[in-house]
Amino acid sequence: MKSDYWNVDDQQVIEKTGKPLAHWMQVLDKFKAADKKSNDVVAHLQNEHGVPRYWARTLTTRYLKEKQG
């Protein structure tokens, strides 16, 4: 796995999840993902939104890196 695997674009995210990055960032904001353990955030995306595990991890990592800036 390359170290920047979370650097994905909208096209890739839409292709794999059906929704753009902005949608997932809003979902994670609403879930208050920045205040939770990353494994809990990944599980939320998988269980509540049907996101495949790899993409749930990718979106979580991207989100947390953006929030920690």
Image: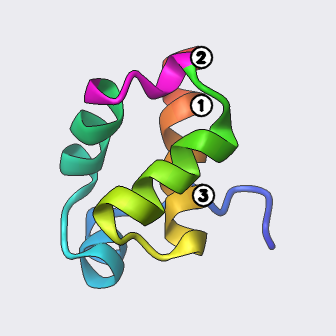
Question: The C terminus lies in which quarter of the figure?
Answer: top right
**Dot 1 amino acid type:** Lys
Nearest the camera: 4 or 60? 60
Gap in angstroms between the C-alphas marked 1 and 3: 12 Å
Q: How far apart are labels 3 and 2 at the CA level? A: 16 Å
Which residues, given as a range, are shown in magenta?
Answer: 30-35
- Dividing the image into 4 quarters, which one contains the N terminus? bottom right
Residue that carries the numbered disc 3 in the rendered image: 57
- The disc label shown at residue 68, or none: 2
In the rendering, which numbered label is found on residue 65?
Answer: 1
Neighbour tally class for label 1: few under 14, some 14-19, many 20 plus, Cα within 10 Å: few
Q: Secondary structure at mark 1?
A: helix
Q: In which quadrant of the rendered view does residue 9 lie? A: bottom left
In terms of depth relative to the viewer, which is nearer, 22 or 8?
Answer: 22
Mark 2: which amino acid? Gln
Q: What is the CA distance from the residue labelled 1 to the residue labelled 2? A: 5 Å
Camera-near label (1 vs 3) is 3
